[in-house]
Amino acid sequence: MSTVMLEIGDLHVSYGQVDAVRGVSLQLAHGQIVSVIGPNGAGKTTLLGAAMGLLPSKGTLRFDGENLEGLDVEARVERGLTLVPEKRELFGELSVLDNLMLGAYAKRAGATALRGRLDAVYARFPRLAERRAQRADTLSGGERQMLALGRALMSAPRLLMLDEPSLGLAPLIVQEILSIVRGLRADGVSILLVEQNARAALESSDHGYVLETGEIALSGESSALAKDPRVQATYLGGGTDDD
Ligand SMILES: Nc1ncnc2c1ncn2[C@@H]1O[C@H](COP(=O)(O)OP(=O)(O)O)[C@@H](O)[C@H]1O
Ligand SMILES: [Mg+2]
């Protein structure tokens, strides 16, 4: 069995009076894709924010056995944790290349290593290579998500946390992005995948958690969750593979 890479235990995150994450426990083993599904407002983004060190939290956060408490965002990036935020947060007026190089900023790698990472990103995303001199705001939605992924890869993550990568994308593009995500895993990057698109997330992950109003309502192997009547009724209800 593979060993635990990310361990979240009894995590609590609040915004003033609002308890957005209430006692969440979750584990991710090396080499896994783990999904967290749940409706808008469930606390998914908050959970990732706390894991990344963007938000204060109470509870246990361990990465490769190391307590993350007290490590700022940059230190977590140095350890191999990287977040692709829900809003992508690209610089529209900057070129594709400049956006990619900003992703390398937090992790001070040498020029040769950065060149190698850039080549690897262009090899994985030929469309970014073709558009390297173009402004980011001229890209399509799918290309922007590729750029957000590519920028994250510039920091050489070992665990990539993806906040709703399918948001706002057409079904075919969603499939393309998720196939890229599975390819990353095949190349040794573990993935924590947060999605409202439960069907796509469960199809692409090994293990899944259902987050509802800040608490884990259900968890299990993704294939089993997809067959669970409660998940089917609430998250997969009546849908088809291409809706
Ligand atoms: N900056 C904030 N200030 C106050 N409340 C917030 C803030 N961000 C999120 N919340 C609240 O926390 C809860 C969880 O939000 P969020 O983590 O964004 O959920 P999700 O990503 O699952 O849609 C929601 O009730 C939301 O309104
Ligand atoms: Mg969110």
Image (spheres, rainbow, N blue to C red):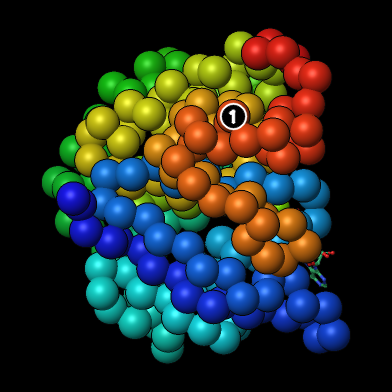
Q: For this view, does 75 lie left or right of residue 22?
A: left
Q: Residue at x 36, y 63 (%)?
A: 6
Residue occupying the far right of the picture: 17
Above-or-below relation of 101 to 4? above
Above-or-below relation of 176 to 234? above
Which residue was labeled with disc 1?
A: 227
Q: Residue at x 32, y 69 (%)?
A: 63
**In x, y percent, where is residue 195?**
63, 41
Secondary structure beneath disc 1? helix
Q: Is residue 72 visible?
A: no
Amino acid type of the residue tagged 1 in the rendering: Lys
Instruction: Say which quarter of the image contains residue 46.
Output: bottom right
Q: Residue at x 31, y 36 (%)?
A: 185
Q: For this view, does 243 lie left or right of residue 89?
A: right
Above-or-below relation of 127 to 55? above
Q: How many marks?
A: 1
Q: Is residue 190 visible?
A: yes
For label 1, being within 8 Å of ligand 1 is answered no
For the C terminus, give its image quadrant.
Answer: top right
